[in-house]
Image: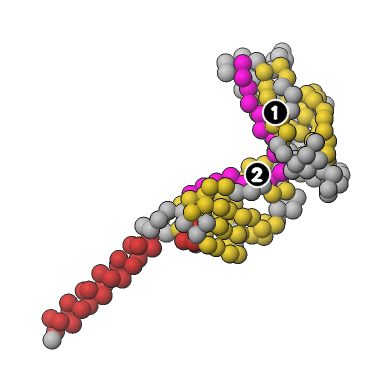
């Protein structure tokens, strides 16, 4: 009888261990897309993917956010407080597995350099206007300007690269401009930031800071 009890105990232990192992080493959660949100009012964040029903923890820029609803192909988390514009890192964790994705918090600015030309892309998520500025300044600022949401990282005297309008809510490919040459800034990265207005909200907002390799560094 004692042997039967011992065997039964061993079997139950193996079943429990298998259950824990299954939870820890089950299918890996996978993020396929995260729709954009406005930085000043992000609210709830939707994450699309697979095996998301197994997710137990979600962080955005290393800050834990509550899970509101979950199913295998969709997670809803939040609500997220107002943020600075930019590209936030999202991490989902299920057991010992995790995956990461990017949450664009609009308005965002990205840029690439090809040869001696700079190609900016601004995503406002709305119609409106923009002013794009560039600078080689070494020390970045962190200034809140009256009447403008977000932070200004460049000098108010930074050179204006372009001014224009957003015809719709799609990402806007701005006019390419020649890589500037500035004495004393050879080798410094070229930094850019845009100031955008939003027709729907009436807000004027700063984008994140974007940069490309500067003059003197081959691309």
Q: In the displayed structure, would residue 59 be above or below residue 121?
A: below
Give yes or no for residue 162 being in the magenta stretch. no
**Residue at (75% x, 50% y) in the render:** 40
Q: Which corner quadrant holds the N terminus?
A: bottom left
Q: Secondary structure at mark 2?
A: strand
Q: In the displayed structure, would residue 83 be above or below residue 192?
A: below
Q: How many marks?
A: 2
**Residue at (42% x, 53% y) in the render:** 28
Is residue 139 visible to us here?
A: no
Q: Which residue is mark 2?
A: 104
177 to the left or right of 48: right
How crowded pointer 1 is (Cα within 10 Å; few <14, some 14-19, many 20+) is rated as many
Give yes or no for residue 109 being in the magenta stretch. yes
158 to the left or right of 19: right
Q: Which corner quadrant holds the C terminus?
A: top right
Name which of mark 2 and mark 1 comes first in the sequence: 2
Q: Quadrant of residue 115?
A: top right
Residue 80: mark: none
Q: Secondary structure at mark 1?
A: strand
Most frequent secondary structure within the magenta stretch: strand
Q: Residue 189, image x and y in percent?
A: 64, 24
Magenta stretch bounds: 99-115
Is residue 127 visible to us here?
A: yes
119 to the left or right of 205: left
Residue 120: mark: 1
């Amino acid at each position: 009888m004692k042997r039967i009890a011992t065997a039964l105990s061993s079997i139950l232990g193996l079943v429990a261990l298998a259950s824990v192992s299954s939870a820890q080493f089950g299918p890996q959660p996978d993020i396929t897309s995260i729709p954009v949100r406005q930085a000043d009012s992000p609210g709830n964040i939707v994450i699309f993917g697979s095996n998301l029903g197994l997710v137990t923890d979600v962080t955005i820029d290393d800050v834990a956010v509550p899970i509101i609803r979950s199913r295998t192909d969709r997670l809803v988390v939040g609500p997220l407080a107002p943020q600075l514009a930019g590209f936030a890192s999202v991490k989902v964790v299920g057991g010992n597995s995790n995956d990461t994705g990017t949450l664009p918090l609009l308005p965002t600015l990205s840029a690439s350099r090809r040869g001696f030309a700079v190609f900016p892309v601004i995503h406002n998520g709305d119609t409106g206007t923009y002013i794009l500025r560039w600078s080689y300044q070494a020390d970045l600022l962190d200034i809140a300007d009256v009447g403008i949401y977000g932070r200004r990282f460049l000098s108010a005297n930074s050179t204006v690269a372009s001014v224009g309008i957003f015809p719709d809510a799609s990402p806007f490919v701005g006019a390419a401009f020649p890589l500037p040459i500035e004495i004393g800034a050879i080798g410094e990265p070229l930094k850019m930031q845009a100031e955008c207005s939003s027709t729907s909200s009436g807000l004027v907002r700063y984008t994140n800071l974007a940069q490309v390799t500067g003059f003197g560094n081959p691309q």
